[in-house]
Image (tube, coloured by chain):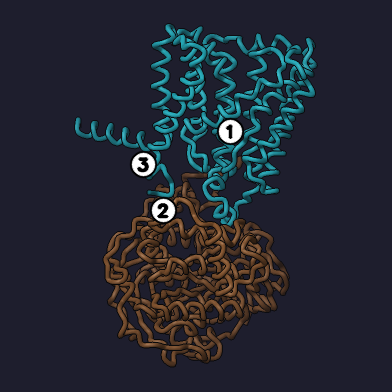
Amino acid sequence: MQLILELRGVEKRFGGVVALDKAELLCPAGKIVGLIGANGSGKSTMSRIINGTLQPDAGEFVYQGKRTSFRSPMEAARAGISMVYQNLSLVPDLSVWQNIWLGTEPLRPGGFLDDRTARARATELTRELCGWLQVDRPVGTLLPAEKQLVEIVKCLARNPQLLILDEPTAPLERAHVDLLFSLLRKRKVAGRSTIFISHRMTEVTEICDYLVVFRNGRTAGTIDFERENKDERRIIELMTGEPVEVGNARPRTATGSRPILEVQGLTLPPKLRGVSLTVHAGEIVGLAGLQGQGQEELMLALAGFRRFEGGRLAIDGEARELRHPSDAIRAGVALVPGDRHHQGLFLNHTVYLNAVYCRTALPKTPWFMNRAGLKEAVRRLCADLRVKTPSIFTPVGELSGGNQQKVVVANWLPLDPKVLLLSDPAKGVDVQAKAELYDLLRRLAERGTGVLLYASDNEELLRACDRILVIYEGSIVGELANRGLTERDIVDASVRSEPKGGRDLPGSRRVNA
Amino acid sequence: MRARWTQGAARGLASLADSALFLPLLIFALILLVNAIVQPGLFQPRIVRSNTASFAPLILVAAGQAVIVLSGSLDLSVGAGMSLINCILSAIMTDSVGSSALALPAGLAAALLMGLVNGVAVAYLRLPSLIATFATSAIWFGAALLLRPQPGGFVTPWISTFYYLFLGPVALPLLLLLAALGGWALVRRRRLGRYIYAVGSNEEAAYDSGVNAPRVKVGAYLLGWGFVFLAAFAVTAQMSSGDAYMGNPFTLNSIAAVVVGGISLAGGKGTVLGAMLGGATLSMVINIIYYANVPSVYQEFVKGSIIIVALALTIVYRRRVPRLAGTGP
């Protein structure tokens, strides 16, 4: 088997975070190679190394039999590599046809742009995949799916030796996925190679000849579909590793207690399409799903940062309309945001000041605050939560990640929230602090708070939650009681909830109860 | 037949209203109207010529600023740069023709060098253009002061003569403007022109597409400073002497002209022609204040009010017409 691309022992670090740890990726020439793995397993990092937007810290990079390494996408493009980026590489103010040729404009003698040819050829190229698009429209005015199609056409127009597609199907309907697949098969006939990255199991097994599974920045295994079975169970096993032991999950039945957060058909295009869920007092509910299915938007909407266009919301039995974050705070909803550096904390302000800011949102804030009393309260809180800080007058930015996150949570406690929303709170937090954080959530729940927790790591959900909801393309498609649950069940529910044929209406999908 | 004609006219109007030039043209026409009222004989050839001559520096420096803003940067040092070029020209030029032959290339070289320094600082050192060019503006100004601590000096009279020389209806300032427009038209039809828009609109996407974004940014600065040189040349011809303080007002006026001309300060949107119209509009505002006999204490007040209204119109209109807004509503 002839290889067009060989990557061995690739390492890549971002600060202290290891994104790739001796990863390996071998691509047979003229085949479609699938690359699959959980969130953060290093797929995108690997693809960015191949196309030169990132440089590896170590490892061997052989392309077309020659040792190379690309220092920029320009170099990779010259070598015949083109990539459909996960977050696209389109320029909003240029038109569709200008974007399609960006970087490879056809020229007339004398170095002048040959716009007539470019436009005509672009019209031709879009015909197959998105013929209804006017090529003169600025890309900024297109819908997400249309942008995705333009990005794909743009890369196909370069007719690259090696095409990398990083999650190209996420915003696409099934019909377009089929069209894309037929184009990829044509490439195969022409002897061109393709790397296809996707979260969707069915797509990967349908189109790929060869599958590489990444886990935690390493290559967990490869499957040659031409010789071996397309066994989805085995793929999921490779993705998640050994089934995780559910040690300290403490499932509770909260059905007896009163619902504290009720959401009905919450809609906020384009990300949320009719989310319905209930959290009971004293319950920790997890939110699972693939990356970017609307988790963060849901949290922001529930905290009053986004006004939703449809749906109802009740907190502790009382219908609420949230026009502003302060409405949510007054209704008893607190959010621990995902990006704590930008949204959760004033990093260069002290622990004390950070604790004070939240209180100003309360309806009855006195004009003058009792400084001595506040200081004492903040000190007590820090001691309670075991926040490790030299003093409450230390800037929050000087604390470790875990302690910073505890400060974010601590800030909300005096407000006695009825509902606590957490958006990936353990991101970049070490194991010890993680455990303490989840202990804290449990204690809060025992005091009657309803907790809704989104975590990108399924293992965390298993440890912390009573019940896990699976979100997919902006609606809840599954509910799993955390009794004897394994990580595999969650991945299963997240990956398999994918619609068959066209765009389904929310609710018409299988619900794993 | 008639229906088709009205349909065509309606479509033409609609596409005009959609065009990025619509508002700059409208504001230009409005100001031109006011100017014609307060300044009798505005359209007499003599007055057209003298106005073109006095408007040319701001129009040219607006074109330079426009190219830089379109690429997603900003340049706060164009005014100080004009001063420095002006002082260099006045320092080298004497009565001899040879000195002019030396001075003009020296001035152009200085302009390109300043553009290069700003461009490298912004594109390769990745300094924020606002601060970087604010800092370099102090350097250019300092250098200009060194060359000419007091206003004065001597510039070959032929420049001034030439500047106000008319070949029938055509005067040199008009030729300078046409040269700038023509130069930009050439660049716009090449990759650099397309890439200036691309990088200004979304630098990362352009880079990911295989555009050498840093080089494009430096290219935008160099081209912009080519126009700044023309502006400095025009100003020198007007004043016939050197003055280190001469360029100061041009910096912020050029940015205002660019925005009134329909260019987004975020980059990637607008036209250089619009910016030049904006430069003409601002120059006329100053004209109007002069001819309307606005008491001098109110002049700045009136000027500021007119500019803020023009700005508000431009920005609000762009928000209303999503097609111009690029990223949609």
* Residue type marked 2: Thr
Q: Colour of chain B?
A: cyan
Quadrant assignment, res A449:
bottom left
Instruction: Tell me whether the residue at label 1 lies in contact with that at label 3, contact meaning CB atoms closer than 8 angstroms.
Output: no
* Residue type marked 3: Val
Chain letter of disc 1 in the image: B
Residue closer to the observer: A269 or A76: A269
Q: State the quadrant of the N terminus of chain A.
A: bottom right
**C-alpha separation, residue under disc 3 versus residue under disc 2:** 26 Å
Quadrant assignment, res A18:
bottom right
Instruction: Tell me whether the residue at label 3 lies in contact with that at label 2, contact meaning CB atoms closer than 8 angstroms.
Output: no
Residue closer to the observer: A356 or A157: A356
Q: Looking at the picture, do discs 3 and 2 lie on one chain?
A: no
SS type, badge 3? loop
Nearer to us of marks 3 and 2 is 3
Where is residue B10? Give x, y as percent. 27, 34
Circle on res. B169: none
Circle on res. A123: 2
Nearer to us of marks 2 and 1 is 1
| Residue under pointer 3 | B321
Chain letter tied to brown = A
In the picture provided, is A103 more to the left or to the right than A129?
right
Q: Dot 3: within a 10 Å radius of its alpha carbon, few (fewer than 14), some, or many (20 or more) residues?
A: some
Chain letter of disc 2 in the image: A
Q: State the quadrant of the C terminus of chain A.
A: bottom left
